[in-house]
C-alpha cells in the first residue's frame, strides 16, 4: 500500500535525511507482520529438512536476521556476496561472486534469501550455482518482488511484498551505502539518485 509521506510519520530516532524520502511504501509494522508470516510458513514447509538459509549480502542482512528469528525449526545460516550493480542504480546483469558459501550445500535443502528480485538475472545465476552444487532443493525468499522489471523467468517462492518500479531504500536497501538503517521501506526522491 502506498502512503503519502508526512514528516511526522517518521520515528524520531531516524535521522538520515528524511527529506530524501518521497513516500513510505511499507511501514515497520507491515514489514514485521509479513516477516512473521513468512517465518511460520517456511517453518511448516521445511519441517524435518534442516534447511540451509543463504542470505545475499549486503542488502538482505536485515530481512535475513528478522526472518531467522521467526523460523522455529533447526536450520543453518550462510551468506554469499555477489555484485551485479557496480556503481549503477540498476543491475548490469554481469554477476561476480565476492564471498562464496563457507560450507558445502550438496544434498541439502537451500533457501536463498534475497532483498529484492527485479530483473531476476542475479537470482538466476545463484539458482544455477546451487543446482550445479547438487542441492536437494533450492527455493527463494525475497523481501520485495518487482515483477515489472523481470528479464528472465525466475520464481520467488516466499515473497514479502510485490512493489512497483520505484527506487526503494530502507530496511537494508541502500543508495550509495546510505538509508539501510531506516526501519521502513521508502521511495527515494528521483533527484537524490539522478532519476527523472
Image: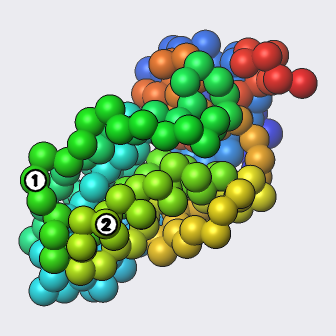
Residue 103 image label: 1
The residue sitting at 66% across, 28% down in the picture is: 89
Q: Position of residue 34 (x, y in %)?
A: 47, 64
- How many numbered marks have been drawn onto this rendered protein structure? 2
The residue sitting at 39% across, 72% down in the picture is: 139
Q: Position of residue 137 (x, y in %)?
A: 30, 79
- Color style of the picture: rainbow
Q: Is residue 108 left or right of residue 61?
A: left
Instruction: Tell me the quarter of the image containing the N terminus.
Output: bottom right
Q: Is residue 106 left or right of residue 41?
A: left
Q: Earlier in the sequence, mark 2 or mark 1?
A: 1
Q: Is residue 3 above or below residue 182?
A: below
Q: Residue furthest front?
A: 132
Give the structural element (helix, strand or loop) at label 2: helix
Q: Residues within 10 Å of mark 2 (few under 14, many from 20)?
A: few
Q: Classify residue 105 by image quadrant.
A: bottom left
| Residue indicated by mark 2 | 132
Q: In this rendered view, identify the residue nearer to me: 144 or 32.
A: 144
Q: Is residue 150 above or below residue 20?
A: below
Is residue 32 at all visible to an observer of this figure? Answer: no
Q: Is residue 150 above or below residue 42?
A: above
Q: Position of residue 129 (x, y in %)?
A: 35, 59
Residue 56 image label: none
Give the structural element (helix, strand or loop) at label 1: loop
Q: Classify residue 18 by image quadrant.
A: top right
Q: Is residue 92 above or below residue 17?
A: below
Amino acid at each position: 500500500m502506498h502512503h503519502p509521506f508526512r514528516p511526522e510519520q517518521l520515528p524520531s530516532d531516524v535521522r538520515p535525511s528524511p527529506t530524501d524520502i518521497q513516500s513510505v511504501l511499507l511501514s515497520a509494522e507491515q514489514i514485521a507482520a509479513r516477516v512473521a508470516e513468512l517465518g511460520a510458513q517456511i517453518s511448516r514447509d521445511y519441517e524435518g529438512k534442516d534447511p540451509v538459509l543463504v542470505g545475499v549480502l549486503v542488502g538482505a542482512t536485515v530481512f535475513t536476521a528478522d526472518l531467522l528469528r521467526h523460523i522455529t525449526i533447526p536450520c543453518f545460516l550462510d551468506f554469499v556476496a555477489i555484485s551485479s550493480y557496480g556503481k549503477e542504480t540498476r543491475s548490469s546483469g554481469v554477476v561476480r561472486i565476492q564471498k562464496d558459501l563457507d560450507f558445502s550445500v550438496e544434498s541439502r535443502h537451500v533457501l536463498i534469501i534475497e532483498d529484492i528480485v527485479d530483473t531476476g538475472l542475479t537470482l538466476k545465476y545463484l539458482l544455477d550455482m546451487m543446482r550445479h552444487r547438487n542441492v536437494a532443493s533450492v527455493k527463494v525468499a525475497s523481501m520485495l518482488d518487482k515483477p515489472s522489471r523481470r528479464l528472465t523467468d525466475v520464481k520467488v517462492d516466499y515473497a514479502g511484498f510485490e512493489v512497483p518500479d520505484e527506487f526503494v531504500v530502507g530496511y537494508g536497501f541502500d543508495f550509495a551505502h546510505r538509508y539501510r538503517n531506516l526501519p521502513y521501506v521508502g521511495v527515494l526522491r528521483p533527484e537524490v539518485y539522478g532519476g527523472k
